[in-house]
Image (tube, rainbow, N blue to C red):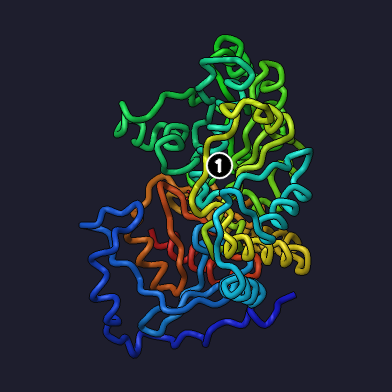
Amino acid sequence: MHGPHDAVLRAPPSGHAGRADPPSWYVAGRDHVWLPYAQMKTAAAPLPVVATQGSRLRLAEGRELVDGVASWWTACHGYNHPHIAISVARQLEALPHVMLGGLVHEQAARLAARLAALLPGDLGRVFFSDSGSVAVEVAMKMAVQYWINHGFRGRTKFVAFRGGYHGDTTATMAVCDPDDGMHRLFKGLLPEHVITDLPRDEETTAALDGLLAGRADEIAGILVEPLVQGAGGMLFHDAAVLQRLRVLADRHETLLIFDEVFTGFGRTGAMFACEGAGVVPDIVTLGKALSGGTLPLAATIASEKIFAAFWSDDPMHALMHGPTFMGNALGCAAANASLDLFEREPRLDQVKAIAARLADGLASCRGLPHVVDVRVRGAIGVVELDAIDIPALKARFVEEGVYVRPFGRIVYLTPAFTIGEEDLARLTGAIVRVLSET
Ligand SMILES: *Cc1c(COP(=O)(O)O)cnc(C)c1O
């Protein structure tokens, strides 16, 4: 089940012996790197990482941490998988990058055909980009222009949901959960969309039905993270919610967009959440684990119905978008290698096994002070608290030899699918221990 790449770096020395001075690159550069989501004045200094392997990060001081996050859940095969490394190295020698302006290369063509074959329904027209946020922006642009090309003006708003996260760019911030402050902070810059409750029951379904009936001529599409709302709070919903969205989108003749940047590539237990839920959207976005956590790559995939609206003799009906590095050959080579691994290695079985171990390992968090909920879906383990001292928790996790990065009131694990049993037990054990202390 585990290949040689799963061999970990040398076991960490126990205790705290031999802490060396930070490396010179760290001292020279640290103050020049502006970190994400960080109050730079008060945030803890970033940990200098000098090597990765499997599910481990090696710090400059020599210590190793078991990685519970897999670099924002991108490194689904663990770090440094040799098959991806070799594929990217070969591609680097042959053809690192050509623009897709009038050109195409084998890796992009193969990847597009493979994604089309893997996705359900006739989702088969692949538009590449370089980040999840841009993939979502492209999906939004496609939806708006779909209506324009059909002669409808004014369908420029999206219905999105509380608890959702779709990215950090201007268009995508505007469809995130409004309570995170960005909507208020950037009022005036952000377009206003309709952010409402997921149709979880009769009442919320009727409310959404009514909303769509009243505003159908303003709405370009419904945008949702299927099955798991990730960075907005690791909230789960079931397939019935997505089936209702499909029914409502069809009834009110609007488009359904699934943002699978988080859920794609096995994270929820199926290769894609849409497939797991048995619902085919009109547009789907992919990113994060697409390249196996190695290179920035994302994609927006449209169905034939969407693509057909752009197929015309009118140049104004073309999709006017084109990121410079779209379809980057190194990224596509990494993604093709990643798909090889999904074919050759038992990733979805590993996800199932991780789900069982997460449920087991985190169960004793229930009943601890401040713990509101413990939930697991696929290779996602979540402990929700009612209050949380994030800096203190982060520091304690590092002392425990694990890298876990809580946000909001959420402590979560999204490990590599190749993580060994012992390392996974270290992660869940550390969470139980640290939360027991609070
Ligand atoms: C991370 C994420 C994004 C944004 O992707 P970036 O690559 O960070 O731009 C969009 N949607 C979802 C669901 C995500 O999890």
Looking at the rendered structure, the kind of residue marked 1 is Gln
Q: Residue at x 66, y 45 (%)?
A: 126
Image: 137 above or below 286: above
Neighbour tally class for label 1: few under 14, some 14-19, many 20 plus, Cα within 10 Å: many
The quadrant in which the C terminus is found is: bottom left
Q: Residue furthest left?
A: 41
Instruction: Determine whether, in the image, residue 111 is placed left or right of residue 235.
Output: right
Quarter assignment of residue 55: bottom right
Q: Residue at x 25, y 64 (%)?
A: 32
Q: Residue furthest bottom?
A: 18
- Residue 124: give x, y in percent of width and height: 73, 42
Q: For the residue with label 1, is its CB less than 8 Å from the closest atom of ligand 1?
A: yes
Residue 201 makes an appearance in the image: yes
Front one among 301 and 365:
301
Q: Residue at x 29, y 78 (%)?
A: 25
The quadrant in which the N terminus is found is: bottom right
Q: Residue at x 66, y 27 (%)?
A: 313
- Residue 181: give x, y in percent of width and height: 34, 36
Image: 141 above or below 75: above
Front one among 258 and 104:
104
Residue 262 makes an appearance in the image: no
Image: 237 above or below 8: above
Residue at the disc numbered 1: 229
- Residue 398: give x, y in percent of width and height: 40, 70
- Residue 319: give x, y in percent of width and height: 57, 34
